[in-house]
Amino acid sequence: MQHHRPKIIDVARLAGVSTATVSRVLSNPQIVNAETRRLVEQAICETGYRPNQAARNLRHQRTGGVVALVPDLSNPFFSQILAGMAAVLAPAGYNLLIADTRTEGRGSLLRYAEPSRADGLIVLDGSLPADELTRRTPVVLACEWIPGFAAPRVKIDNRQAAILAVEHLIGLGHRRIAHVEGPAGNVLTEARLAGTRDALAAHGLPAPRVFAGDFSLDSGRHAATEWLALPITERPTAVFLASDAMACGFIGEVQHRGLKVPRDVSVMGFDDIELVSHMAPALSTIRQPREAIGRQAAHRLIARIAGDAQPDDTVLPVELVLRASTAPPAESD
Amino acid sequence: MQHHRPKIIDVARLAGVSTATVSRVLSNPQIVNAETRRLVEQAICETGYRPNQAARNLRHQRTGGVVALVPDLSNPFFSQILAGMAAVLAPAGYNLLIADTRTEGRGSLLRYAEPSRADGLIVLDGSLPADELTRRTPVVLACEWIPGFAAPRVKIDNRQAAILAVEHLIGLGHRRIAHVEGPAGNVLTEARLAGTRDALAAHGLPAPRVFAGDFSLDSGRHAATEWLALPITERPTAVFLASDAMACGFIGEVQHRGLKVPRDVSVMGFDDIELVSHMAPALSTIRQPREAIGRQAAHRLIARIAGDAQPDDTVLPVELVLRASTAPPAESD
DNA sequence: GCCCCTCTTGCAATCGATTACATAACTGCA
DNA sequence: TGCAGTTATGTAATCGATTGCAAGAGGGGC
């Protein structure tokens, strides 16, 4: 007739033992006598006892949880990374919890950066303030990184990846190549733009026309309207966009206006999210090894929690995926 | 020269007060003398003290966190719902944490269903075992629901929504209409199929041909290959798919094989995820009020945590969104 | 000068589990 | 019988913050 949740002492009393014994049955069964163990287990069933996690966390000084800070959950780019993390963390005894840095207020986010809240943090958002993160919970950075913040990073070589993409377009014969960049201030934006510039310069081509973007579908659509507004003779014949989501928006708008891809414009994306292989035309893009990024980040974090990790980089290889959205330019000049 | 994290007692000693006073400065500043407060605040700064959450949770018997259990984070359908939740939960003092029921092991999921881990649970996955959820943390169901599990539900009328979709196709003149359903055993699958059947029967049309699916893009593509394998005279002229993701896959495959939408087949989706308005052709679909679903679910949960909630349903209205993927059938017979 | 009231602050119990240490019971061997 | 060694269990301190209760200080009225 007790209304409160049963505590360990309720179980102990029912089984006629001390709380210590009950605790041992739960965490170290083999050191308890078989008969006693049976008694305690039965008492646990009867009372429906479930250990209080807060008390356990306080005592153990660990939470058994890892929090991933994601800049934008609506971007399907992240889901496979998260799956990779969970695949490594679960067997190691950690729960993966996810928080969206956009929807949660900036301030409340740092509440996660507490050892008493999470055993570790995987940060996928490079715009978080470095100084707030310092000297707290172990942190690993993945995909994006925070300049001046020393922590293990798991990433790709964004500059090289952009070079790969642009050289493909150059190889097809394009000479006027545009870039749609990511949000201002983002480290990926810088790196991918730099790679684009490098590749063009290396081939003696003019600097790219750059359209603003923010990785979102809608910003890709907007870039398309700007591209469409250019006189035909000035229009870049190929566009390299810093995310697949933007490439989708770009192609959608271009097609909506009656033009065809790749006949009228070649389009390269970045990320290789699942969707883009099913589009018409299927998108040529740079594949990031998302699952591997997640797994590596989780491994690095576990190592760091154990205390033996160095703040160095793990750089994973990308892959150029050629599909149907890129082709030689219509007329060669 | 202390290596350990500062505790409240370290602050108290430095400021020359008791731990009680430090605690009050943090939680109830106005009852502390201004000068004492200043002293304590300075000591907090100097030591870099941050309260231990585990201890606080144990004492308060609350965690300040709410966990959302999502069946598939890679589906962008959920992100806006989660944003809606966070928008309501944050001002109410709750953090929103998200877990993917696919990637986390089934067993470890129920660890979240503990009052000592989370103050509440928003379940978006109807396939979780009801008996495990009972008598634990307050639960609210959203979108999907668990048969036989009494909890507040926030949902749409899926059957009515399917009727809306199919009647649109019938109104365009289609008579052979197919349905691509969701995963077996899912409550949404049943409801949307039932609505499809109802609408056709109400208009004296034959029962729909049903293709298997699981809401995923790839299963939509697969349904398209089955559709394409049918003799032209038997092919349904319109297809209603139980998710937008499947509709994307379906259209992609159909276009890939050289057919055109809606010329050769009309396609209706379900959900109205952001992407589908940018596709070519833009998808006609059923819009779920995703943000509102999230907000309502959060409100219901907060009420339930406060203790005064009834396990009744909140049903939100859907909207028929007509775009370019549906048109009258090519030849009328 | 005395009493009451308000404002501040400290003391110590408390949240619920874990675990180092102590102790008791039992075995086996000299 | 006595002692060392092993096994099983209980006692009580501990994790770190919160908060009810008590008490001291200071002010005002009579």
Image (cartoon, coloured by chain):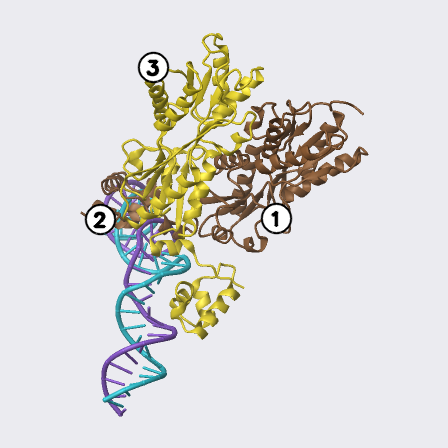
Chain colours: A yellow, B brown, C cyan, D purple
First in residue order: circle 1 vs circle 2 = 2
Pointers 1 and 3 within a single chain: no
Three-letter amino acid code of the residue under disc 1 = Ile
| Secondary structure beneath label 1 | loop
Q: Tell me if B39 is positioned left or right of A143 in this view.
A: left
Q: Nearer the viewer, mark 1 or mark 3?
A: 3
- The answer to which quarter of the image holds residue A123 is top left
What separation in Å lies between label 3 and label 2 (alpha carbons)? 57 Å
Q: Tell me if B237 is positioned left or right of A11 in this view.
A: right
Instruction: State the image coordinates of residue B97 (x, y, percent, origin top left).
Output: 45, 42
Could you tell me if residue B93 is visible in this image?
A: no
Numbered badge on residue A204: 3
Host chain of mark 2: B
Numbered badge on residue B146: 1
Front residue of this view, candidates A287 and A228: A287
Host chain of mark 1: B
Three-letter amino acid code of the residue under disc 3 = Gly
> Badges 3 and 2: C-beta atoms under 8 Å apart?
no
- Above or below: residue C16 compared with residue B327: below
Classed neighbour count for the residue bearing mark 1: other residues with Cα under 10 Å, few (<14), some (14–19), many (≥20): some
What separation in Å lies between label 1 and label 2 (alpha carbons)? 50 Å
Host chain of mark 3: A
Instruction: State the image coordinates of residue B108 (x, y, percent, origin top left).
Output: 47, 52
> Which residue, as the protein is rendered here, is positioned at the far left?
B1
Classed neighbour count for the residue bearing mark 2: other residues with Cα under 10 Å, few (<14), some (14–19), many (≥20): few
| Secondary structure beneath label 2 | loop
Give the residue displayed 52% in from the left and 46% down from the top: B102
Give the residue displayed 39% in from the left and 46% down from the top: A66
| Secondary structure beneath label 3 | loop
Pointers 1 and 2 within a single chain: yes
Residue behind mark 2? B3
